[in-house]
Amino acid sequence: MKRLTIEERARAWDDYLKVNHPRYYSDLHPQIIRFADILQKEDRKELLDIGCGPGRNTVHLAERFNVTAMDISEKALEICAGRVMAQGHGLRTILGNQFALPFPDNCFSAVLSAFSLNFGYLDEIDKGEKEMFRVLEPGGLYLLAVLSDQDPRDKKGEKVEEGTFQTEDGLVMHYFSEKELEDLPGTIISKEHSIFHRGYEGEKDLGEAGAWFVIGEKEFEKL
Ligand SMILES: C[S@@+](CC[C@H](N)C(=O)[O-])C[C@H]1O[C@@H](n2cnc3c(N)ncnc32)[C@H](O)[C@@H]1O
């Protein structure tokens, strides 16, 4: 199967979000609320939401932090900004690719990457992990939520790498093993596996999915 370009995937997400209503992504994960509580307690202000999508998490975060929302899909950013502004909050939106972030080093006090990094091939995911870490200031925290290899759903598409599946309609999805999380940068503060209910698409029950939620810290350099 031919490897998908970033542009092809951006178009696939635009097309998907044009027909799929953002309410599919409305339930907040408790792990993300707990992360936001930690950030608020520690008075962290500048937060990057990587792969914000239609803004499920962004709406909540923009109430509490200065949020930069980034995505490869223009449609995602449009829906996200509309939802956040409808709540009376501000945000900065940036069109960009998580595997080559359009930000300088050390510029965010926290980064959220929720169900975005798993949309990639292994070499890209490796870059994306390093990028997420690069833009964090020393002492900064990230929360990474990714699909797990214990996800109970039938995998759609063709297997193109260990744990990675590619579909005809332009998506590439990787399901993380626990072993792969050992390569994450920084000090891992917590790691949790969760099987959760995905909600409903109209009347249709979307069933369950499985994910890892990892919180990591970028250490200060030792002098
Ligand atoms: C399943 S949605 C998750 C949205 C949101 N973070 C949430 O948890 O509800 C995945 C999002 O990742 C974005 N995405 C996929 N690949 C990306 C990339 N290479 N760079 C930036 N965003 C990407 C998609 O456009 C989509 O909006």
Image: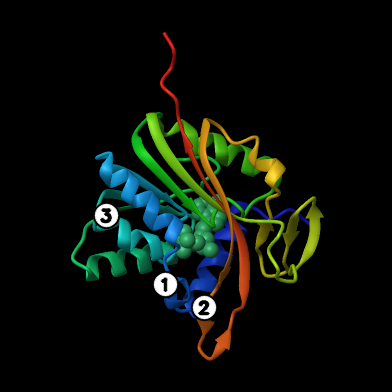
Mark 2 vs ligand 1: CB below 8 Å: no
Mark 3 and mark 2: Cα distance apart in space: 27 Å
Residue 179 percent across, percent down from the top left: 71, 42
Residue at label 1? 26
Identify the residue at horizontal 73%, vertical 61% (top origin).
166
Residue at label 3? 91
Circle 2 residues within 10 Å: few <14, some 14–19, many ≥20: some
Mark 1 and mark 3: Cα distance apart in space: 18 Å
Relative height, residue 201 to residue 44 (above, below) = below
For badge 1, the amino acid type reads: Ser
Q: Are marks 1 and 2 in contact (CB under 8 Å)?
A: yes
Circle 3 residues within 10 Å: few <14, some 14–19, many ≥20: some
Which marked residue is nearer to the observer: mark 1 or mark 3?
1
Mark 1 and mark 2: Cα distance apart in space: 9 Å
| Rendered-image quadrant of the C terminus | top left
Residue 170 percent across, percent down from the top left: 66, 64
Q: Which element is circle 2 on? A: loop
For badge 2, the amino acid type reads: Gly
Q: Quadrant of residue 147?
A: bottom right
Camera-nearest residue between 158 and 27: 27
